[in-house]
Image: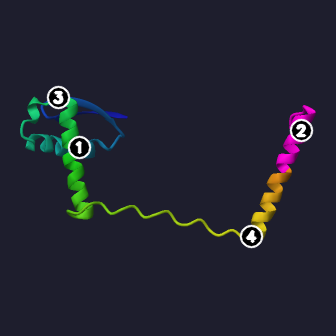
Amino acid sequence: MSNLDLSIGGRNFTVACAPGEEAHISALGQLIDAKVASMNGAAGQGEARMMLFAALLLADELHELKYGNGPAPAPEPPPAPPKMDPAVAEKLEAIAISLENCALHLESTGRDA
């Protein structure tokens, strides 16, 4: 791991990154710093609040790039489970009943499986 110093909003942060990722992380830090600098009155904000606003602004930009100006599309519903063959369902039910009966028998005799 490499340590990298970033300056964001006039504050210094040390972050760890994988070797070879320093330039990429540094560029991301500069992007965040530019976003903080573009926010009016960010200098007077607390660190957490400043980062929250910067993250929201960047997330909004990402959203617009992905979806345009509209709301994000609704997630697609999960696919319906496949239909089970009634004969297979009956056999599984019979096996489950048989297993329950075995468990009850073992419990009544005081033996563990």
User: Disc 4 and disc 2: Cα gap in Å?
Assistant: 30 Å
The amino acid beneath tag 4 is Pro
* Magenta span main SS: helix
Q: What residue range appears in magenta? A: 99-113
Q: Which percent across, then down, holds residue 102?
A: 88, 45
Q: Is residue 6 left or right of residue 74?
A: left
Nearer the observer, 73 or 55: 73
Lower position in the chain sequence, tag 1 or tag 4? 1
Assign the C terminus to one quadrant of the image: top right
Q: Which residue is mark 3?
A: 46
Residue drawn at (90%, 33%) of the image: 111
Q: Which residue is mark 2?
A: 106
User: Disc 3 and disc 2: Cα gap in Å?
Assistant: 64 Å
Lower position in the chain sequence, tag 4 or tag 3? 3
Q: Nearer the viewer, mark 3 or mark 2?
A: 2
Disc 2, SS: helix
Lower position in the chain sequence, tag 4 or tag 2? 4
Q: Which residue is mark 1?
A: 55
Q: Residues within 10 Å of mark 1 (few under 14, many from 20)?
A: some
Lower position in the chain sequence, tag 3 or tag 2? 3
- Determine whether 68 is above or below 62 in the image: below
The amino acid beneath tag 3 is Gly
Asked whether the residues under the numbered discs 2 and 1 touch, taking CB atoms below 8 Å apart as contact, a structural biologist would say no
The amino acid beneath tag 2 is Leu
